[in-house]
Image (cartoon, rainbow, N blue to C red):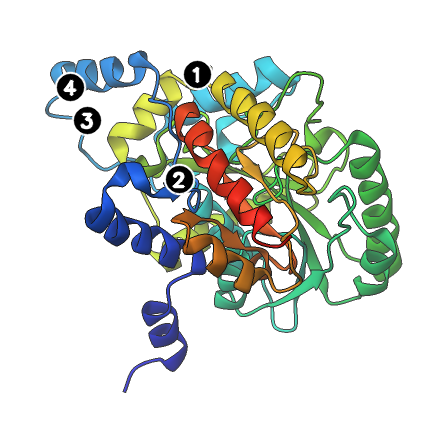
Amino acid sequence: MVSERMKGLGTARSVIRELFEYGKLRAAEVGPENVFDFSIGNPSVPAPGAVNETAIRLLTEQPDLIHAYTSAQGDAAARQRFAASLNRRFGTGYTPERLYVTSGAAGALCCVFNGLSCPGDEFIVFAPYFPEYKVFIEGAGAKMTLIPPEIEGFQIDFDAFERSVSEHTKGVVINSPNNPSGVVYSRATLERLAAVLAEKSAAYGHPIYLISDEPYREIVYAGVEAPWVPHLYRDTIVCYSFSKSLSLPGERIGYVLVPEDVTDAGDVYAAVAGAGRSLGYVNAPSLFQQVTSICCDMTADLKIYEENAKLFVSALREMGYHVVEPGGAFYLFPRSLEPDDVAFSERAKKLDLLIVPGSGFGAPGHVRVSYCVQTETIRRALPKFKALAESYQ
């Protein structure tokens, strides 16, 4: 006998991964240049040269130490560098004792959900959302409550949100810049969210934590503001990853930040650390703890994503697609040209155009297009998008 739930998770890939795997098989049949894969968020720009140089230097200078265990919560020097970087950028006073280094943002989120969850707890998530949230939250023994999307701008439907908050709400998850929409929550949206959470926390007599999932924090386009969320709401816990900013998704380095101002901060941090221990997440990869902490003020060449977005949005709108303007990340979330987004995605697939149905993100009638690809790939794909649109005329 095995866990049926875990068996299901192990045998049913996400629709994103299914398309990605299909794309690889299809590329072997017809040539990779003939498959236009916009399914997965794998950064297309290389890591800064300093990343590899730092890794090589550390491997040379510390061959007897660099692969050793670190403290469970992460190497003290690495956490000091991370904290100092945040303090320089956001005018804060964070200490290394408030950072827990994890295996990417996924590890950070799992530590937070497992650390906070008590029987009967619920976490609110706003659609469109990263579908693994449901897996992480339910894996922690809690319930996910989904707020339908506000499709005109993908901000927050506050009427639906306020109706859903209850005494069982332990936390609210936000992801800005957002996967899959590319939208950045405005300061006004975040301030209103903070006000509602403060009011509801007082009414129910316990803090409602705001969990800010920020792997795309640095990918914000010109003229768009992405406020530092802990400045706006005291009980904010930050989950971060270097996968996108440094183009290091396979190295699995991120962290949880529990600011000192958070209610019961000491207990929250201890629970995050305890969850890491329980889940077997102690000691994130040691080499890249050092590399990312030394390079944490750098980014990959992120401007290409904004250029890709401008090209894509303009072209798709000319073809008749409805696209909400992205403010960051590297995704578009256009409306499908028929109500059934799965059928729309399947029709695109026949053109070797791989786009992900929005139903899996809690927003049916849309598709996700990941444009972290070479700009030339987008140019060559545009006739396919045009042919897809014309097939509905």
- Cβ–Cβ under 8 Å for marks 4 and 2: no
Dividing the image into 4 quarters, which one contains the N terminus?
bottom left
- Cβ–Cβ under 8 Å for marks 4 and 3: yes
* Sooner in the amino-acid sequence: mark 4 or mark 2: 4
Q: As shown in the figure, which amino acid type bears the numbered disc 1? A: Asp
Can residue 246 be seen here?
no
- Cβ–Cβ under 8 Å for marks 1 and 3: no
The residue depicted at 79 percent of the width and 30 percent of the height is 187
Q: Give the residue at mark 1.
A: 301
Above or below for 96 versus 359? above
* Sooner in the amino-acid sequence: mark 1 or mark 2: 2
Whole-Å distance between the Cαs marked 4 and 2?
21 Å
Whole-Å distance between the Cαs marked 4 and 3?
5 Å
Dot 3 falls on a residue whose secondary structure is loop
Q: Give the residue at mark 3.
A: 66
Foreground mark, 4 or 1, reads: 1
Above or below for 22 versus 153? below
Dot 1 falls on a residue whose secondary structure is loop
For mark 2, does the 10 Å Cα neighbourhood hold few (<14), some (14 to 19), or many (20 or more) residues? many
- Please state which of residues 258 and 33 is positioned toward the viewer in this rendering: 33
Whole-Å distance between the Cαs marked 1 and 2?
30 Å
The numbered dot on residue 73 is: 2
Q: Position of residue 166 (x, y in %)?
A: 80, 65
Q: Taking 206 as reference, is 350 left or right?
A: left
Q: Taking 235 as reference, is 213 left or right?
A: left
Foreground mark, 1 or 2, reads: 1
